[in-house]
Image (cartoon, helix red, strand yellow):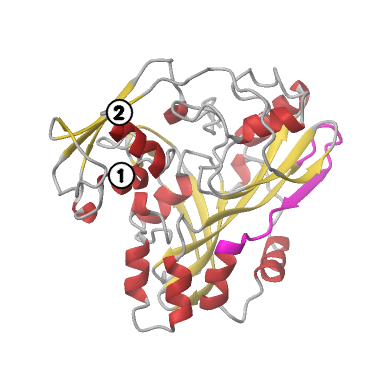
Amino acid sequence: MTSEPTEDLIPDELEDDGEPRVEELIVPEEADGMRLDTFLARRQSLHSRTFFQQLIKDERVTVGGSPAKARHVVAPGEAVVVTFPPPESPWPHPQDLPVEFLYQDDDIVIVNKAAGMIVHPAAGNPDGTLVNALLHHCPDLPGINGVKRPGLVHRLDRETSGVMVIAKTERAMKALSKAIQARTVSRQYLLLTLGDPDWATARIDAPIGRHENFRIRRSVNGIAAKDAVTHLTVLARANGFALVKARLETGRTHQIRVHCSHVGLPIAGDSLYGGTVERALEKVRNAESPLRVALQKLDRPFLHARLLRFRHPETTHWVEYRAPVPPDLRRVLKTLFPEIDPESFMTKVNLDEPTPGPASDES
């Protein structure tokens, strides 16, 4: 095994230096006709539409070199320039925010992160994050892995829900970080793809780096690409969709989303990588109305971190934690796969997963 880290433990797109950041976006064909604020919110998933409306009001957004209104309708080829403000404070502070705790002891905390919650403060989002909530509920966290990201071993995208582990001690932090880099932590996700593959299982081995045109995006063989491996298993199929289990072998930023899009199976609801709700609705134009309604209400990628399995940093025993499928995704599953109970079905599937071994033993 090489000495290069196998995991993006601190994703580079979230780093900041306290200075304003300027970013240019070229409007693609698929965004033709969108409002400016909607286009920005979908292209920059770290920030909300309200956030961009305020930037537009502050004249921090230009189209073709001139300030524009939030209601401006974008056209393919237009250059949209956004000047992001610097973070208000580099130091996160405790906030009494709701967090679902799945387990906690003296060494680790297991949470079920809600969709829409950012993991840690970054430019434009100084508070309201999981870190702010953890600092309130777990006051021993400050100092573990630095002040800005206390206890964080890994992360989930803002709109991805599901299970996360947080270290409460330096010893746990080192042990879990080492386990992730050695690829002995099993991380399983549930997702819904636009498209029904002609295979039951697949191993996608395609390096991921920065997209050459869009800073927030990643792409296969992009700038400074690093090795990335994702294992996919089809669980069910219906109406041109596939319910899929993904298992990460590496952990690059947006890895599952990029890999699925790369093989022509974008995740439903993932507008950043081609899985727009509009495309999903096109597939079910003749389907029963409950399915169309459920898809119309899907306002994020159908991606849920379902399971974590690893050796406990103190006892060294194998432990496993699952996050229940959230209501918004259950609604879609109920209409697409009425014969499936997500919880019992996923429990059976997850128990079939072998205990992970070192990287050299994976295929």
Looking at marks 1 and 2 on the same chain, the residue that comes earlier in the sequence is marked by 1
Question: Dot 2 corresponds to which residue?
Answer: 58
Where are the magenta residues, as a range? 311-328
Q: CA distance from mark 1 to mark 2?
A: 13 Å
- Taking 278 as reference, is 121 left or right? right
In this view, the residue farthest toward the front is 57
On the image, the x and y values in percent for residue 93 come to: 64, 23
Task: Tell me the crowding category of disc 2: few under 14, some 14 to 19, or many 20 or more residues within 10 angstroms, Cα based.
Answer: few
Residue 217 in the magenta stretch? The answer is no
Check contact, mark 1 vs mark 2: CB within 8 A.
Answer: no
Q: Is residue 304 visible?
A: yes
Instruction: Specify the amino acid type for callout 1.
Output: Asp
On the image, the x and y values in percent for residue 319 come to: 79, 46
Instruction: Tell me what residue is drawn at x 20 percent, y 55 percent.
Output: 33
Eyeballing the image, is 264 above or below 199? Answer: above
Instruction: Tell me what residue is drawn at x 77 percent, y 40 percent.
Output: 311
Q: Nearer the viewer, residue 235 or 111?
A: 111
Question: Dot 1 corresponds to which residue?
Answer: 37
Instruction: Specify the amino acid type for callout 2.
Output: Asp
Residue 131 appears in which quarter of the rendering?
Answer: top right
- Taking 64 as reference, is 322 left or right? right
